Amino acid sequence: MIQTILDALSYGGLYGLAALGIGLVFGVMRLVNFAHGELIAIGAYLFIVTIDLGLPLSILIAVTGTAILALLMEFSVFKRLRLAGPAVLLIASFGVSVFLQRFYEIIFGALPLSGQIAPWMTGVMEFGDTTITRGSIVTIILALILLGGMWFFIEKTTLGLQIRAASSDFQTARLLGVRSNRVIGAAFVFSGVLAAAVAFVLVTQRGSVDPLFGVNITILALVGTVIGGLGSLQGAALGGFAVGATISLLNSFLGNYRVYTYTWLFILVIIVLLVRPGGLISNKAVKERV
Amino acid sequence: MSDDLLRSSQLPGVTRFQWQQLLGPIVVIVVLSYVISSISITFTFLTEGTLALLVMVLGLQVFIGNSGVLSFGQAAFAMVGGFATGLLTVPVKIKENVLDELWEPLKAINMGIWPSLVIAVAIGAFFAFLTGLFLMRLSGLAAGIATFALLMVADNVFFNWRLIGPGPQVMPQVPKFGFVDESIILAVVVMVVVYLIGISRRGRLLRATREDPLAARALGASVWRLRVLFFTVSGGIAALSGAMYAHHSGAVSARDFYLGFTFTTLAMLVIGGATSMWGAVVGTIAVTAIGQVLLEFESGVTVGGIDFTLPNGARGVVIAAALVAILIWRPKGITGGREFALRLPFLNRP
Amino acid sequence: MTLLSVRDLQAGYGKVQVLFNGHIDVEPGELVGIVGPNGAGKSTFLGTLAGSVRASSGSIEFDGASIKGRNPEDIVRLGLAMVPEGRAIFTDLTVNENLRLGLTGRREKSGAQQAVDEVMDLFPVLTTHKNHQAGLLSGGQQQQLAIARALVSEPKLLLLDEPSLGLSPTVIQDVFGVLARIQERGTAIIVVEQRAHLVMSIAVRTLVMREGHIRATLSQSDAQDEAKLAAAYFGTGEDRE
């Protein structure tokens, strides 16, 4: 029972991190970055490939590499599409996503690469007669630290304030002197860091990485972002948490019926977009955002 | 009011019927198809498959090109069409043995390819109509995400529901087209339909709203009706594409019409030029050609005594890069969104 | 030296041109008005100055430098700040946070606290609501916040787009009263208004725009001449309150 709750919390935290990564970029650019999954994937690849150098160095390389890829995406593609409409941005991010997937296939091969990242993440701990997995605890702690850190950054620092302003009204923020490139760059860097964290948890769980590593969680995190409210950072994190926790609970309790989970989730997405584009969780009255 | 809109806005694209715009692409496709398919059996197979893709891209064009609304979900209707025609044409004995969980009436039914195609198109259009009633209330980003959600739902359902299909497995023994002619005829019919719809009054009206979102909002319900209409037509054409693909490969499975299919067909449309029928044709030809050339290089090609072997996946990388490059530098596509025009002095109108 | 000098400015949206042959001169410390009916191109004109609208041709010289085609975030750092139409304050952020954002555009980082204090002096109501969500303020208070936010960057030239929009007559008086005090401190101001009479009595010069063109430039004394005003407006007497 305790494990069920811990699983729900850890999945929730994990998906919350993924959704926040997507939400950050969406806030400042109105771009739904399908390629976020490929950021997660490069993080995982970097972990697998550099783990022999020791975990601390591997973490440094993975986080830096993911952030760099995120910035590359922005500078080479999305920056040039700043003034393009939502349809073009969506197709472009889709194109970048496919490009990277095939690119990984070329560089790393189509077959999964295995590696043991952090053996201490697997395994269980015992307290009296209850057994809980280490992985779920570590994930929860990691999610708390990162989400807390992001909250502090967004709410208490000047750059965070500029990001909030830019997410709310980009044009007016620029009129006040907020530098668009800096704010958008920061959003991408942080989304990269969050992606690397997600990659860490996933790759320690699965023990391997392949070109399509990040696709699944990105699609579900996107659901979370929409349900939580496009354009709201808290909404994204909470929405992601809700989706992750729900999936985990469904896995634990329903077993057989979970095949249609996606159907219900995506019908919910459509309903939210039709009826309450501001999201179910956040309270904003969102009219022109989408 | 819609007449004011037609008159006042500077309408891009075609406004009246011009023979060369319709015949040009048709001649190109017919000639290319016969020439390429006569090279070898492999190329016949390629041509047949490409024609099915062309129909899909045309289906995308008629909706996305005219309304300016992005739909990520048309592959769902291709799924519907592929499954429908499969269920209707696969021999009863096969269905009873391999697809034993099928709904009984579906097991018993059987008909020829052509009646089945008609029904597949009708079912696809019907579902497009139903979903369009809701989805066409959205625009821009919301429409893109909602139609993506539609694709996810369709995939989840078709991949799992054994009452209506083979679930995760393949539906085998779908009767194949005899010759490439059938695909060519179907492709030509769709090209005519898409062209005529594009230059029709309704098509021009819809394009006017694409250019002028404020006017679109002012027109309110009429825009919604137009979009539903075009979405329905697009769905029917997508279903036809799915059905053509089924009769081409001899098998149907849900994952045939999922993200890879969506990416390839969208790339074809964007690279060719989303706002014209000729753009859809050019895009399909261009992407297929690039793909084929790269495929050769992936198996190894010797040029002037030097061996070139591209790694697997190079095809996807190049097409994806081409798509992004077009979006950045030539967003209107290779054709610039214009219809076919042969620049010969005696053919040009003054 | 003339603070702002604009010549032959053309601007529009997509294929539609909205501003034809825009021109204006503003000396340091002057208050200049731009009036005209809806859709006359006044907001577009301001937008090209502030950098949020791209001018297709023409010249904009500010404080000795050409600013045409530059980014808004660079222009504000040169000393040209704009208060957009409809106030455009960040409703989810607090009053204090809105002001802090205004500091981003300062040329010199030092003196920031002093600038904030001065602005709180001009608008005492902001001190009372310092930590409240900006969206909870009344229309008039939000307008004051918007002006204050632009002022903390200590601009040489302040652009105001329809500051009276949606405000009651008393509040309008307050707001325009503050404008006079701002001018006293040496800041030049351009005010765009549909309601001509608000601006013409305080502006040294008022441009009258219609359908994208500047039709006339009226002096302060002309403001009393109803015939001249009507002629410039071409019979839009319904604008009178």
Image: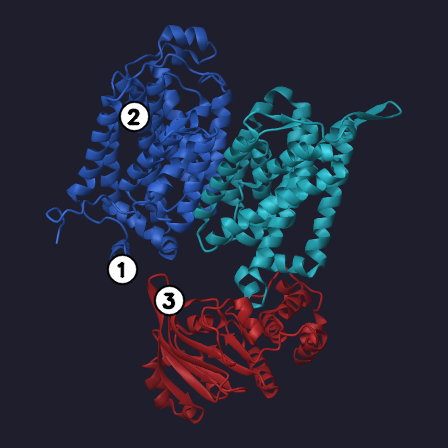
Chain colours: A cyan, B blue, C red
Residue in front for this viewpoint, A167 or A180:
A180
Q: Quadrant of residue C139?
A: bottom right
- Circles 3 and 1, Cβ within 8 Å, touching? The answer is no
Q: Residue furthest left?
A: B346
Q: What is the distance, in whole Å, between disc 3 and disc 2 at their CAs?
A: 48 Å
What residue type is disc 3 on?
Gly
* Discs 3, 2: same chain: no
Question: Foreground residue, A128 or A90?
Answer: A90
Alpha carbon separation for disc pair 3 and 1: 17 Å
Left or right, A250 with reference to C166: right
Residue C91 drawn above or below residue A228 = below
Badge 3: residue crowd in 10 Å (few <14, some 14–19, many ≥20): some
Determine the residue located farthest toward the right in the rendered image: A128
- SS for tag 1? helix
Residue A121 in the image: x percent, y percent?
76, 30
Q: Secondary structure at mark 3?
A: strand
Point out which mark residue B47 bears.
2
Q: Which residue is mark 1?
A: B8
What is the chain letter for disc 2?
B
The three-letter amino acid code for the residue at tag 1 is: Ser
At a point 62% along the width and 77% down the height, the residue shown is C154
Residue A251 vertical position relative to residue C26 in the rendered view, above or below: above
Residue highlighted by disc 3: C12
Mark sitting earlier along the chain (1/2): 1
List x then y, in percent, for residue A250. 65, 27
Mark nearer the viewer, 3 or 2: 2
Residue B350, relative to residue B241: is it above or below?
Answer: below
